[in-house]
């Protein structure tokens, strides 16, 4: 889970989902109350990073992490063309390992995620809670209605620039690489964000994150870190490929005319195959790398596959778009803004239809 140098980027992304608090205003009284309370807590605990860096009472370890964050934040605006605003220029300690917990859900015989729709954010494939018990309670309610569910802790937090989002204590346990990647990813959402199109939004932010991280590490002469990051990126791509292949097989199964009991049995068989494929990959190409063991060490269901499709389905096409403008980020941003004006179907046809060969 987040907080170790071995956290796979896929899992880390699960812990960086942008929760748009302003969007919860139409979500119902109880949900609104917990959302507003959580946002007020963050606001009340914010402290300017610049002030903490000059305060002699700031612990040395915290100072070191905040100095790194500050340098990466400056690089993001000056070298990557990301917004130069108050986002991630303050710090807040929320006193817990995650800032929010997100609930994902699907029907029992579907790989399509349930969506929750709000103003500003549009429709998203998760519902976030500031208290773990509230998230688990909501997930239980969905399960009682026959849904597959998954609950994931979220260590980073973004309101897409609507509030002055702080750097959180939940983020500082990450490696330098993961921390910089998070900043670039979340700031990218402020450049282009299409309400209701999570697949495009997350793929765009992922491609900006990748390009930004390569430049950031190169600028600091950290070539070993860059090599390690590229190796992890390749592992992550193989992991995601396994999930997407499983998702395709399950989709075909659910669309078939088989009886529900047989679908249920074959569903469990497919998740067993997925775990076996992972074991073979780990023992073979990965030389025993165990970074995904925690993810596979639970009972899997359709909801655990949601983020693979959401965060990676459009990445190859947007990588090609960046290459087509000679990796010039401002030109890439402009191309992405043009795509954002298209219909969802047109965007998908342009950048989401063809995978990497």
Image (cartoon, rainbow, N blue to C red):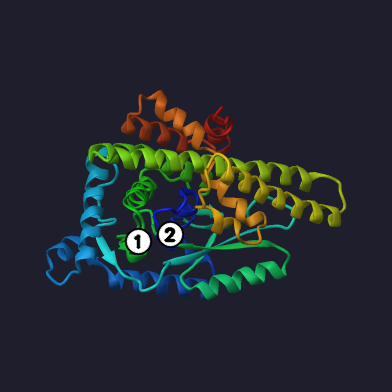
Left or right: where 252 falls relative to 231: right
Most foreground residue, 46 or 59: 59
The quarter of the picture where the C terminus appears is top right
Q: Is residue 72 visible?
A: yes
Residue at 67% over, 45% down: 246
Callout 1 crowding tier (Cα within 10 Å): few <14, some 14–19, many ≥20:
some
Residue at 34% over, 30% down: 331
Looking at the image, is 16 positioned above or below residue 218? below
Kindly report the distance in space between the C-alpha atoms of the residues bearing marks 1 and 2: 7 Å
Most foreground residue, 78 or 226: 226
Q: Position of residue 349 (x, y in %)?
A: 57, 31
Looking at the image, is 285 positioned above or below residue 262? above
Q: Is residue 213 visible?
A: no
Q: Are marks 1 and 2 in contact (CB under 8 Å)?
A: yes
Query: Which of marks 2 and 1 precedes in the sequence?
Result: 2
Q: How many marks?
A: 2
Most foreground residue, 140 or 84: 140
Residue at 52% over, 40% down: 237
Q: Quadrant of residue 16?
A: bottom left
Residue wearing tag 1: 173
Residue wearing tag 2: 2
Most foreground residue, 240 or 195: 240
Q: Which mark is residue 8?
A: none
Callout 2 crowding tier (Cα within 10 Å): few <14, some 14–19, many ≥20:
many
Q: Secondary structure at mark 2?
A: loop
């Amino acid at each position: 889970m987040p907080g170790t140098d071995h956290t796979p980027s896929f899992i880390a992304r699960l812990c960086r989902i942008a929760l748009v608090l302003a969007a919860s205003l139409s979500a119902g009284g109880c949900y609104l109350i917990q959302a507003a309370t959580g946002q007020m807590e963050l606001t009340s605990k914010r402290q300017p990073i610049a002030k903490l860096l000059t305060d002699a009472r700031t612990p040395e370890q915290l100072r070191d992490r905040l100095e790194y964050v500050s340098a990466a934040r400056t690089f993001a605006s000056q070298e990557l063309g990301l917004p130069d605003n108050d986002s991630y220029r303050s710090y807040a300690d929320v006193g817990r390992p995650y800032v929010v917990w997100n609930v994902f859900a699907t029907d029992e015989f579907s790989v399509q995620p349930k969506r929750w729709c709000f103003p500003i954010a549009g429709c998203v494939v998760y519902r976030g809670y500031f208290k773990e018990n509230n998230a688990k309670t909501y997930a239980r309610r969905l399960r009682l209605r026959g849904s597959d569910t998954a609950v994931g802790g979220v260590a980073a937090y973004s309101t897409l620039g609507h509030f002055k989002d702080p750097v959180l204590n939940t983020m500082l346990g990450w490696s330098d690489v993961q921390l910089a990647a998070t900043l670039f990813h979340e700031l990218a959402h402020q450049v282009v964000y299409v309400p209701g199109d999570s697949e495009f939004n997350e793929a765009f932010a992922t491609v900006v994150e990748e390009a930004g991280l390569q430049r950031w590490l190169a600028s600091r002469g950290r070539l070993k870190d860059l090599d390690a990051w590229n190796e992890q990126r390749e592992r992550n791509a193989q992991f995601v490929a396994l999930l997407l292949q499983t998702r395709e097989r399950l989709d075909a199964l659910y669309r078939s005319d088989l009886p529900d009991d047989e679908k249920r049995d074959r569903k469990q068989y497919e998740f067993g195959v997925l775990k076996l494929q992972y074991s073979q990959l780990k023992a073979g190409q990965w030389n025993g790398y165990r970074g995904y063991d925690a993810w596979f060490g639970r009972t899997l269901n359709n909801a655990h596959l949601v983020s693979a499709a959401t965060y990676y389905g459009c990445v190859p096409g947007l990588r090609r778009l960046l290459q087509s403008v000679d990796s010039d980020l401002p030109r890439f941003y402009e191309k992405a803004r043009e795509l954002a004006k298209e219909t969802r179907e047109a965007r998908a046809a342009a950048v989401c239809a063809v995978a990497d060969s």
